[in-house]
Amino acid sequence: MGQKITIEPVTRVEGHGKVTIHLDNEGKIEQTRLHIVEFRGFERFVQGRPYWEMPVLVQRLCGICPVSHHLAAAKALDVIVGAGTGEGLTPTGEKMRRLMHYGQMFQSHSLHFFHLASPDLLFGIDSDPLKRNVIGVALEYKDLAVQGVMMRKYGQEVIKATAGKKIHGTGAIPGGINKHLTEEERDYLLHGNEYMNIDKMIGWAQDALEFFKEYHKKNTAVIDGFAEFPSSYLSLVRKDGALDLYHGVLRAVDTEGKKILHDVDYQEYNKYIDEEVKSWSYMKFPYLKEIGKTNGWYSVGPLARLNTADFIDTPLAQKEFEEFRSYNNGKPSNRPMHAHWARLIEILHSAEKIKQLLNDPDLMEGELVTKGTKKYEGVGLIEAPRGTLFHHYKIGENDMITMANLIVSTTNNNQPMNIAVNQVAVKVMTGKKEITEGMMNAVEVAIRAYDPCLSCATHALGKMPLEFEIYNASEQLIERKYRG
Amino acid sequence: MSQFVRFTIDGTECMASRGQYLVDAARENGVFIPTLCNYPGVKPKGSCRICTVKVNGKLMTACTTPVAEGMNIENESADINELRKSIIELLFVEGNHFCPACEKSGNCELQALAYRFRMMVPRFPFQFPNRAVDASHPRIIKDHNRCILCKRCIRVITDESGRSIFAYRKRSASVEVVVDPKLGKQLTEDLAQKAMDVCPVGSILVKEKGFHVPIGERKYDKVPIGSDIENMQSTKI
Amino acid sequence: MSKPIVATTSLAGCFGCHMSVLDIDEKILELIELVEFNKSPIDDIKKFTKKCDIGLIEGGCCNSENVHVLKEFREHCRILVAVGECAIMGGLPAMRNGIPIEECFNEAYLNGPTVVGNDAGIIPNDPELPMILDRVYPCHEIVKIDYFLPGCPPRADLIWEALVALVTGDEMKLPYEVVKFD
């Protein structure tokens, strides 16, 4: 008899997932799987709702990066109301949305680095699980914890100023935005107090990068050698090849950096991308059509973005980008743990962008919304903190949604995460008599590098060969299910 | 006979014009009695019962009861408020009120009353009824999930000859408020907007307009429903 | 005296409520002085290691696993708090309550414009996956819930006030602005 290891739930990630690892008698890994265990059916229940509700409705897919869904839906609806794709909005509309988006990138990346991932770096992968969390960090590295908390707060405050609320706001509407930035909001974000200060945030972003680079130097093997495997990478880039998190064209490169998707218009995304359904996960497996199911998978996210982009258009982040690229000899980095590095460069880039935008008068006055000739189909793409996010809607003559297709960032990373899980399991568990907690955490560390948002991924329901009954608090049977 | 009458609300001496309905008489005295089906300018219906008060110890609807000399009205008592709260809770479980993604959130009177009465959760089981959304009219969407059958739109939105543009359809538990198929064309842009504004919930939505008022600037974001009346300098005569 | 112990979980939610807990910002440092955390997605305690005082539940029940976890929380926590609209009334996922589950599956795995290759008509059904229920259940329809904090998500101040009140035994002070359903 072999052995089955189950890691459930995967913790310090956002959402619900579990890992199963099957070992044979000799302790060889037979099979590893990251199962996504939820399904919420958004594609179906948004049908028959008015299109303008989408940005507010679908952001409830995810409370960690609601802004991504909010904006991706709004961008798809921009197309539907005839405002065009990206370039069509008024300066105020476009810039307010960008400010919201960089605010979210800043908060989400800070959350991931400080609250979720840093315990593995600070305490070690096989350290005491009772301590290995943000609270442990706060007790032993208070300054770092304060920094993480205040950076996340800053990003959340940017979101509140643009969307009215830190989580699940309403700012973006089809064709634009519903408010200007007030002078009071701008001043608060520029230099409100010691912590509400954009220069402080830029400084802290640089400090975090220094911290990582120092750690990297001391722990090169952990960062470079952990679950390394070749992958293709996909992201949006600006037309001129610059890193752009809000709008651009779709590019993919192979493991050597050669373009395999040539800066294409994302309105035609389904000419290039398909999804495979597997019986053991509610999350689908996307791939590039031209290459096919087996090898067409790709990675998305911070690492993918820095692997596909040619340069960054803010000076401090560009300098860091150059260092990152030269460390990897100008080629894509195939080291999942480098995602932490890339994420920190993006935090810096976002802070620089926020500063630029806060000083832009367009945010404070000008037309908010623009519309043109109505269409009945639209695609919205955005680089969410965790990678490329696809929203695709069709509407009927009566303005109601007739079709919704969502490929979320984490779904794009489904295959890479599964490969990373396998790599680590094979490396740390093969032939071991006893599977320790630390080994299992190593598997989770590989998953965490992708900062997966399993909440997002579970938008899409199951049956089991079992009978399942639910009883309420007074022991009454309220639902009985069989797998048919 | 005097034009004015004297009465008390929760023990406080009040004065109002003879024949005024209790909700209006109370308002003039700076007292808020919650309403849902009631709407200024049209005949009161007394159907939602949220305005229930005790008049000389007896439960009555304040929107349909004219004020009279010497009435003792109980409005802000624990009993009455509990009764009102349970009506709100029943309305919440009876339909599908998904506040988070509703365009009317922040401006919705049902929601605002729930806030005022501090409803944290309805005590009754959610029904999750299967209801349709009717988007067939070119200007508006009628979302039956959210309709509380207050009849405000039927009473207020009329064409030039006074005919109601909205109407009841079906009966009993499946009754719905719809745009009258014959008069639907009379629903002008202005009337459509008015219908949306008159609707106390999010059941009538003007097409292609939504979420234009930022969070923080909506009617009930910062102040409870009725506070405008309570903060008004009492207009005692 | 030992600190009160808090456990948290997200069922069929979006993690927004957990994020709203983090939105208490600098008060997080106060919170960790005030309470001890047990099973929670923010730490690596995957199974209850002791009896807890307060359990915070985000999300309603949409699958068999959610029901299992919720009952486990009821068993291990003295007080259960339903945090947010999903826990209280199913939230937006309950918008599927009128729709047959097969239609939801078909839309996601068969009809989507980017699943053209699924000729075999695969719909996930592995025994490792929990079973999806016909409808989404509010938590208090499955177990007894002691307190409810509405909002999507509940405002950070509401969560903070409620936690402090539960820990100290003081009455909850809830300003008008903090109790919202959106």
Image (cartoon, coloured by chain):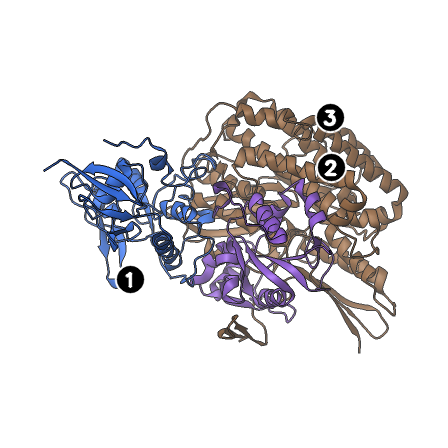
Q: Locate residue A407 relative to residue B80 in the image: left or right.
A: right
**Tag 3, which secondary structure?**
helix
Q: Residue furthest bottom?
A: A1
Q: Which mark is residue A315?
A: 3
Q: Which chain is brown?
A: A
Quick one: C113 or A341, which is closer to the camera?
A341
Q: Chain of mark 3?
A: A
Neighbor class of circle 3 (other Cα within 10 Å; few <14, some 14-19, many 20+) is few
Q: Position of residue A381 (x, y in %)?
A: 57, 42
Residue B94 shows up from this direction:
yes
Residue A236 shows up from this direction:
no
Give the Cα separation between the discs numbered 3 and 2. 23 Å
Q: Tell me the colour chain C is drawn in.
A: purple
Q: Which residue is mark 2?
A: A147
| Residue at figure coordinates x 81%, y 58% from the top left | A424
Q: Which chain is blue?
A: B
Give the Cα separation between the discs numbered 3 and 1. 64 Å
Q: Which mark is residue B174?
A: 1
Three-letter code, disc 1: Ser
